[in-house]
Image (cartoon, helix red, strand yellow):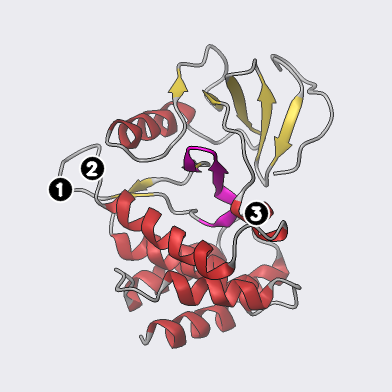
Amino acid sequence: MSATGTGTGPGVPGRLLGSGRTADVYEIDEAWVLRRDREGYGDAAAEGALMAHVRAHGYPAPAVRPSPGALTDLVMERVDGPTMVEAFAAGTLDPVEAGTLLARLLRDLHAVPGLTTPDAHVLHLDLHPENVILTVDGPRVIDWANAAEGDPALDWGTSAVILAQVAVSAEPVAAPAGAMLAALLADPSALTEDGLTEALRRRAVNPTMSREEIELLGAAGELVRSVAGL
């Protein structure tokens, strides 16, 4: 996210702290922020319930509290620190550390009992370096809008594809993204060909993807298969 300016629009409580692809984050006070979905299709109540569930089982998600606003408003704990991307840019986190941390966060999440049944697995489905904030108390995982229950292979596939899209691009961080991908998949993971295929399919129809990003999916999938030995 990029911090900027002052909030505008109905019901905005304070200044705009940051903006992502589909949502804006506004200041409430020193302890809380409001995350508002610009597209209007988010279910903040369901997202907040899942965040509260994983947090109750020790997973590092921000705290949440009921929102008096729209269904797309989520009030959550204000989390201070750089994202993994910002830490990498500042030279305080290397790609191998980043990939290893993402792998640990995936494993820890999939060990949390499901919200609907204990045997279900909670999936984040958007776990990548921009959605992990490095606080003085450890990492915090944000942006749970896509979270659901399902096969962990899909979660591993999603994170791998996101990194691989950058790794096969012309971006200056392509090489570090490749190193992150290798570290993510270095230890035994739950990634399968079916999980990767479904992750690629979902990325292809994701409305936030640009045409250029979608065109990279074929090469990204082949890179993931090569690294994972699928």
Amino acid type shown at disc 2: Gly
Mark 3 Cα shell of 10 Å, populated few (<14), some (14-19), many (≥20)? some
- Name the residue: 41% across, 39% down: 60
| Mark-to-mark CA distance, 3 and 2 | 32 Å
Q: Earlier in the sequence, mark 1 or mark 3?
A: 3
Give the image quarter of residue 104. bottom left
**Which amino acid does the dot numbered 1 rest on?**
Asp
Counting residues from the N terminus, which is met first, the one under dot 2 or under dot 1?
Answer: 2
Q: Is 179 included in the stretch rendered in magenta?
A: no
State the SS at label 3: helix
For the record, the magenta segment spans: 128-140
- Residue 114, label in figure: 2
Tell me whether the residue at label 2 lies in contact with that at label 1, contact meaning CB atoms closer than 8 angstroms. yes
Question: What SS does tag 1 mark?
Answer: loop
Q: How many marks?
A: 3
Mark 3 or mark 2: name the one nearer the start of the chain.
3
Q: Which residue is mark 1?
A: 119
Residue 98 is situated, as x and y percent measured from the top left of the image, at: 52, 62
Q: How far across and how far down the image is residue 86, in percent? A: 68, 52
Name the quadrant of the C terminus.
bottom left
Residue sitting at x 62%, y 48%: 83
Q: Is residue 139 magenta?
A: yes
Callout 1: 10 Å neighbours few (<14), some, many (20+)? Answer: few
Instruction: Give the answer, above or below, for where 38 lies relative to 146.
Output: above
Return the residue nearer the eye: 191 or 150.
191
Report, in whole angstroms, how far the alpha carbon at label 2 lies from the one at label 1.
6 Å
Q: Is residue 120 left or right of residue 38?
A: left
